[in-house]
Image (spheres, rainbow, N blue to C red):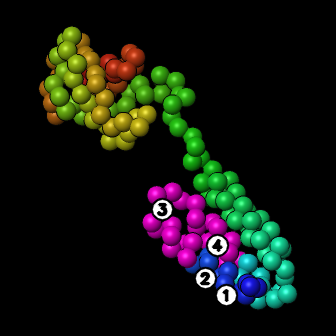
């Protein structure tokens, strides 16, 4: 069976619709590649199946490259490699009372290293609902004081 231009367009639309059911974001680019080949087949209707598949692979790879290099260049950057000093001065809200020699909890407006809630210690008693700022990072604990 020889593929016509609309076969590629239907394949592309099906792949893009399947993207809704798949938890990863990768079928979109293969679907767009198939639509591009469908449009290419309108211009060059005698393109052999081998060239169609090669062009589909190349266009799909181009779309993936564009996504990661142009539109989402910082997608793989995390804050995990940052120094401890980066978090000094961050302000959060106490959600569990902090007492000297007892751990409490703080919630930040924006996640720090992927977590919004952190265990913390302080030299003074700080009640839930008060704002605090980070003084130091001690392992997995944050040493804080009133803001």
Q: Does label 3 or label 1 sit earlier along the sequence? A: 1
- In terms of secondary structure, where does tag 2 sit? helix
Range of magenta residues: 14-36
Q: Are marks 3 and 1 in contact (CB under 8 Å)?
A: no
User: Which quadrant of the view contains residue 131?
Assistant: top left
- Residue at 83% of width from left, 73% of height from top? 50
- Residue at 83% of width from left, 74% of height from top? 51
Q: Distance between the residues labelled 2 and 3?
A: 18 Å
**Mark 4 surroundings within 10 Å by alpha-carbon count, few (fewer than 14), some (14 through 19), many (20 or more):** many
- Residue 89 shown left or right of residue 124 in the figure: right
Q: Mark 4 points at which residue?
A: 32
Q: In which quarter of the image is the C terminus?
A: top left
Q: How many labels does the image show?
A: 4
| Up/down of 141 relative to 82, above or below | above
- In terms of secondary structure, where does tag 3 sit? loop
Q: Do the residues labelled 1 and 2 touch (CB within 8 Å)?
A: yes
Q: In the image, which disc is placed on residue 6?
A: 1
Q: How far apart are marks 3 and 1 (CA)?
A: 24 Å
Q: In the image, which disc is placed on residue 22?
A: 3
| Image x and y of residue 69, in percent | 68, 53
Q: Name the residue under label 2.
A: 10
| Image x and y of residue 104, in percent | 21, 23
Q: In the image, which disc is placed on residue 25?
A: none
**Can residue 102 be seen here?**
yes
């Amino acid at each position: 069976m020889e593929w016509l231009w609309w076969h590629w367009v239907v394949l592309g639309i099906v792949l893009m619709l399947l993207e809704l059911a798949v938890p990863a974001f990768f079928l979109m680019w293969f679907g767009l590649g198939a639509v591009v080949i469908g449009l290419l087949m309108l211009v060059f209707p005698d393109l052999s199946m081998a060239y169609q598949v090669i062009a589909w692979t190349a266009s799909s790879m181009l779309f993936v490259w564009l996504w990661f290099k142009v539109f989402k260049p910082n997608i793989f950057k995390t804050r995990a490699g940052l120094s401890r000093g980066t978090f000094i001065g961050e302000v959060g809200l106490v959600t569990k009372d902090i007492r000297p020699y007892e751990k409490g909890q703080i919630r930040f407006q924006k996640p720090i290293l992927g977590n919004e809630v952190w265990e913390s210690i302080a030299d003074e008693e700080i009640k839930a609902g008060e704002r605090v700022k980070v003084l130091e990072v001690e392992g997995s604990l944050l040493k804080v004081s009133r803001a």
